[in-house]
Image (cartoon, rainbow, N blue to C red):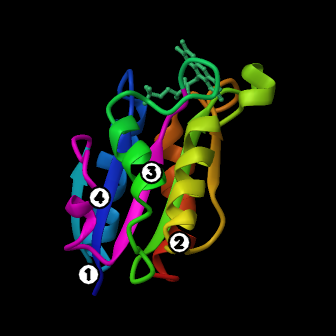
Amino acid sequence: MAKILILVGTESGNAQMVADALKPVLDAAGHAVEVTDKATRPAELAGHDVLLAVCATHGSGDIPTNILPLAEALERDRPDLSGHRYGVIALGDMTYQDTFCGGGKKVDKVLELCGARRIGDRLEVDASTQPLPDDEALAWIEGWKVLV
Ligand SMILES: Cc1cc2nc3c(=O)[nH]c(=O)nc-3n(C[C@H](O)[C@H](O)[C@H](O)COP(=O)(O)O)c2cc1C
């Protein structure tokens, strides 16, 4: 059993909806799961061995404001997260082309910089072709949860 913290980066609620849909699936797999859109300090990650970032993209490839302080602190302070594993679900929209899923990609990068090891491939959900991001995430989590 893993202690999983789902980190939500959202401006308009899609990422929260995805996180809320995934929590019961991970609970049922026997994990202890918390969901937060309020983590701002790296110390808040300490009690969890697996992180799952569910992160939208805003502005021009930017990280949502609620999770930006955490991402900036991770990049600046580089806490040792080598004891952590993580997954990333990036939400974006292909019509933004060059900045597609930029928020989730940046969060992926800072977690890697801190030594955390990613489990599986990053899921990138395109809002222009996938109106219900939780459907795609629910399919993806089936493969991810067995790797945890
Ligand atoms: C103002 C605005 C800017 C956006 N910029 C990007 C972007 O640069 N790249 C991208 O892939 N998606 C972009 N998106 C799409 C969002 O990431 C996508 O709709 C996502 O599902 C929103 O999730 P949220 O409701 O959790 O914030 C943008 C959306 C808005 C409204």
Confirm if mark 1 falls within 8 A of ligand 1. no
Determine contact: label 4, label 1, CB under 8 Å: no
Reply above or below: 115 against 78: below
Spatial separation of the CA atoms under disc 2 and disc 4 = 24 Å
Label for residue 30? 1
Residue at far front of view: 77
The three-letter code of the residue at mark 1 reads Gly
Q: From the image, tell me which residue sits under label 4.
A: 42
Callout 1 crowding tier (Cα within 10 Å): few <14, some 14–19, many ≥20: few
Query: In the rendered picture of this protein, how many numbered marks are placed on residues?
Result: 4
Q: Which mark is residue 144?
A: 2
Foreground mark, 4 or 3?
Answer: 3
Residue in view at x 38 percent, y 21 percent: 12
x, y percentage for residue 145? 46, 75
Label 2 or label 1, whichever comes before in sequence order:
1
Q: Which amino acid does label 4 sit on?
A: Pro
* Highlighted magenta segment, given as a residue range: 37-57
Q: Residue at x 26, y 41 (%)?
A: 37
Q: Can residue 112 be seen in this view?
A: yes
In the rendered image, is residue 141 in sight?
Answer: no
